[in-house]
Amino acid sequence: MAKIFCIANQKGGVGKTTTTVNLAAGLAKVGQRVLVVDLDPQGNATMGSGIDKRALELSIYDVLLESSSVQEAKQHSEKAGYDVLGANRELAGAEVELVELERRERRLKAALASVDKDYDFVLIDCPPSLSMLTLNGLCCAHGVIVPMQCEYFALEGLSDLVNTIKQVHANLNADLQIIGLLRVMFDPRITLQNQVSDQLKAHFGDKVFDTVIPRNVRLAEAPSYGLPGVVFDPSSKGAQAFVEFAREMVRRIETM
């Protein structure tokens, strides 16, 4: 049975897509079967996996409107080693169209049920707002992975996200929980980042992942080559950290 995780944070620019594609590539490297679901109309996770969003014949848009199945719409990323359910600008229209449809927040859950046995992990890259798309992701997920920078404003955004998850847990998905907080773009030379990191560990305890993703130029360069950093430069510190994070995720799932 596939474990489904949303990579979510209502604050933009915190590295959600970078986390999604690199965790997927890291999990593939350690022998897991992975599907990435791109729920962001910008389609960055699709492009960052080496798939041209402009050339998609079928996308997550078609799956949500039930004119296509996941099996028909998914594509395999040869270089990255995982499957992708891609997105492009069409997805922005789904936001409006879903409002009037039945089971509007459970469409993705129904679609993913058909591929439950085909994958060990399904990773959902959510847009940075609490939209109908994000709600679809949260309604089908077993948990949420929250990438965050160790900065003051990140703490503000985190409290909003925790409240959202509590509401979804109470009303729509009793399985939903925060799996863990992932510290990304971390620079140990900055005093504030160390202070915020300590605050996170004091407040959230073992919900903070042991792995820390360092600020790394190679991770930032990788998307322009249509590759996750784990594949683009496996020897870089950022890539090695994501492979270690993948191993930590596998261990954490075994104890869930």
Image (cartoon, rainbow, N blue to C red):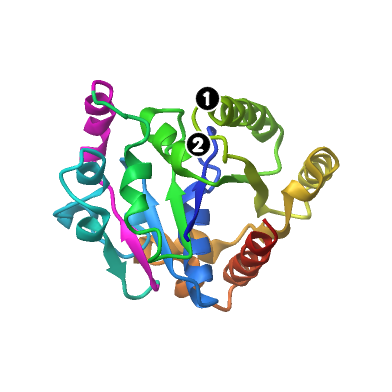
Give coordinates of residue 215: x percent, y percent: 63, 57
Which amino acid type is shown beneath numbered disc 2? Gly
As rendered, which of 228 and 249 lies closer to the eye? 249
Q: Which residue is mark 2?
A: 12
Going from the N terminus, do you reach mark 1 or mark 2 first?
2
Give coordinates of residue 201: x percent, y percent: 81, 45
As rendered, which of 185 and 137 lies closer to the eye? 137
**Residue at the location (61% across, 26% down)?**
160
Q: CA distance from mark 1 to mark 2?
A: 26 Å
Give coordinates of residue 190: x percent, y percent: 77, 48
**Residue at the location (53% across, 69% down)?**
26
Give coordinates of residue 182: x percent, y percent: 65, 51
**Disc 1 or disc 2, which is closer to the eye?**
1
Q: Is residue 130 left or right of residue 73?
A: right
Bounds of the magenta span? 81-100
As rendered, which of 45 and 1 lies closer to the eye? 1
Q: Is residue 82 magenta?
A: yes
The dot on residue 107 is none
Q: Is residue 57 left or right of residue 138?
A: left
Q: Quick check: 98 above or below 81?
A: above
**Residue 139 visible (yes or no):** yes
Q: Quick check: 138 above or below 6?
A: above
Q: Is residue 229 magenta?
A: no
Q: Is residue 9 left or right of residue 47?
A: right
Which amino acid type is shown beneath numbered disc 1? Asn
Screen quadrant of the C terminus: bottom right
Q: Which residue is mark 1?
A: 171
Task: Say how many tags the image has.
Answer: 2
Q: Quick check: 28 above or below 107?
A: below
